[in-house]
Image (tube, rainbow, N blue to C red):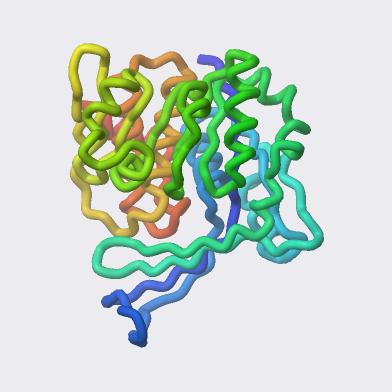
Amino acid sequence: MKKPTIAVIGSSSMDLVVSSDKRPQAGETVLGKAFDTVPGGKGANQAVAAARLGADVYMIGCVGEDTYGEEITANLKNNGVHTDYVEPVTHERSGTAHIILAEGDNSIVVVKGANDHVTPQYIEKAEELLKNSDLVMIQQEVPEETVVHAAELCSRYGVPLLLNPAPARPVPEEVLAQVSYITPNEHEAEVLFGGPALSEALKVHQNKLFITEGAAGVRWHNGREEVLVPSFPVQAVDTTGAGDTFNAAFAVAVAEGKGMEESLRFANRAASLSVTGFGAQGGMPSREAVEEGLKP
């Protein structure tokens, strides 16, 4: 099978990760158990996950001209991601994400830094790449106008665009109309469509809107009925990056021409394996691991 070419427009950052038994409340100080720095950012995470799953992946993004930027770029290359369109900006630090792992889940504060320089003008440098890609992925850790422009470009060239609307913010109607796939989690879906209307939103965006529900799986409407594709039960070590792994795996499967149900099972399996390792990218599985995990 020919490797699909996937372009990822998005953020890259250094994740500063603290593990603790207890999540601090406002004004409270607690003791942590461990501290680590690991490469992350939703765009870079999705690029790395897609490369590990067998796609030919190009990252389109910005880093600072600093040590974190060098480490982020080296990590992408080490994971087989093309970095031709990753540029350092001299007047901005690399993006960082400040993550607390506690009580079986994570809390994250993102400082965008150089990721704010992934502008419409910047992604136009990669227009020829986008035009010739099998699928393009984008998230919302880059400016809103970049998401709008990417949707316009992909629509113009007939290239499928997967929008992972994270972190949550409203998405313009014209973007929702132009993208091929929208993959919010439950919170993000409520921001986009309103809580009580999620079933209606699924019906309106048949075969296009896929709402991830953590350990429960992913919900979508196949044109006949609303369906929940269940996840795979595992013992979670670190849930950071599970959504990014899901998105990447779904993108790879769809770009390879797999059917929707098969693509979602593939994505669910990849995401379930990802939470068994530490760090956003630490647990991201290989193609072989996902396929082995799908065997009866």
Q: Is residue 203 left or right of residue 182?
A: left
> Can you see residue 3?
no
State the image quarter where residue 131 is shown: top right
* Residue 285 in picture, x, y percent from top left: 41, 42
* Residue 66 in picture, x, y percent from top left: 74, 64
- Say which of 292 and 115 sits in front: 115
- Please determine whether, in this image, residue 168 is positioned above or below residue 219: below
Number of disc labels: 0
Which quadrant: the C terminus?
A: top left
- Say which of 190 and 247 sits in front: 190
* Residue 186 in picture, x, y percent from top left: 29, 43
- Say which of 258 and 193 sits in front: 193
Q: Which residue is rendered at x = 62% and y = 30% of the image?
A: 150
* Residue 165 in picture, x, y percent from top left: 45, 40
**Residue located farthest toward the right when viewing the structure as drawn:** 90
Q: Which residue is rendered at x = 19% and y = 23% of the image?
A: 226
- Say which of 192 and 164 sits in front: 192
> Can you see residue 282?
yes
Q: Is residue 135 left or right of residue 254?
A: right
Q: Which residue is rendered at x = 64% and y = 52% of the image?
A: 115
State the image quarter where residue 203 is shown: top left
Q: Which residue is rendered at x = 51% and y = 68% of the image?
A: 16
- Please determine whether, in this image, residue 169 is positioned above or below residue 257: below
